[in-house]
Image (tube, rainbow, N blue to C red):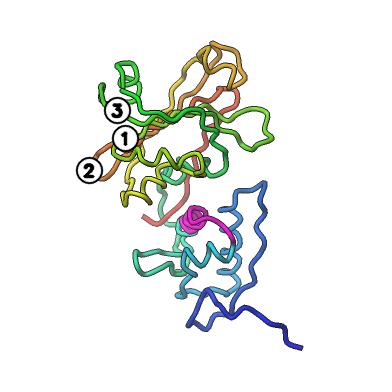
Amino acid sequence: MASKTDTKSPLAGSKARKPATPALARSGEPLYLQLVRALKEEIVSGVYPIGSQLPTEEELCERFSVSRYTVREALRRLREDSLVSSRQGAGTTVVPPRPTDSFVHEVMSINDLVAFATDVRFAIDTIEMIEIDNKLASRTGIAQGEEWLAVRGLRHASKSAELPVCWTEVYINREFAAIGRLLQRHRGPIFHLIEDLFGQSIVEVHQEIAAALISPDLAPGLKVKAGSTALEVQRTYKLATGKIVQVAINTHAASRFRHAMTMRRVKG
């Protein structure tokens, strides 16, 4: 006897069969990597042949029960692997594999710089408007005397993790400070929230990594000795106009920090 099935297809109007939805685990490997693997398997197996379109972001979110950020990161990875191409308003299309006839040193994308924000919990300690003093201006590049929203707290890999990932300070341009009321309930990169709420687009993130010492104030939270070595990762987020939207400083205990960089072969 035929079983009753859901008639809503992520490829409405196409001849492609509706694939079964593999379960995504809620722990271990990041969800976006699990989604990448699931979509790759469907592309390779012919569920989505060359020239066909993948479901929309909204449909993928619903099908796999994941966030829009997870879907966007998975699609970006598929584009990096030359399996799909995306155009604004035209969706995401499966493309023929490209020959690897040149070598490009691709440092990181904006998503790579902040991907960890979706996999860790930001336990916010304080949210307040502050005036940028001389010391903070020198440290962040923000003009002295301006008012910015300061968000500070510890990041943890999970609720059960004994050691925190880092101490985080996020300074948000006063123009976008209204997001402060949403941050206690927000998960993921703060800059995505700014983009969604204010219709802005972050086009550049400048990153610097510098050696530092753990201050007496931060030592207890990071569970290290005051004066021990730290690494500060500072990221400055800018619009196309050059306006600084956000400055984030993550202070890591040096013994628990590793910076990784991936290089891929792509067609130049």
Seen as rendered, the residue at the extreme bottom is 1
On screen, residue 204 above or below 147: below
**Helix, strand or loop under label 1:** strand
Going by the picture, which residue comes out furthest to the right?
1
Q: What residue type is labelled 1?
A: Asn
Is label 2 in a helix, a strand or a loop?
loop
Label annotation for residue 193: none
What is the CA distance from the residue labelled 2 to the residue labelled 3?
20 Å
Where does label 1 land, which residue? 173
Q: Give the range drawn in magenta.
A: 65-77
In the displayed structure image, the side of residue 119 where residue 197 appears, left or right: left
Residue at the disc numbered 3 = 147
Residue at 43%, 43% in the rendered image: 108
Q: How crowded is mark 2: few (under 14 residues within 10 Å), some or many (20 or more)?
A: few
Q: Distance between the residues labelled 1 and 3?
A: 8 Å
Q: Nearer the viewer, mark 1 or mark 2?
A: 1
Reply yes or no: does residue 79 show up in magenta.
no
Circle nearer the N terminus (2, 3): 3
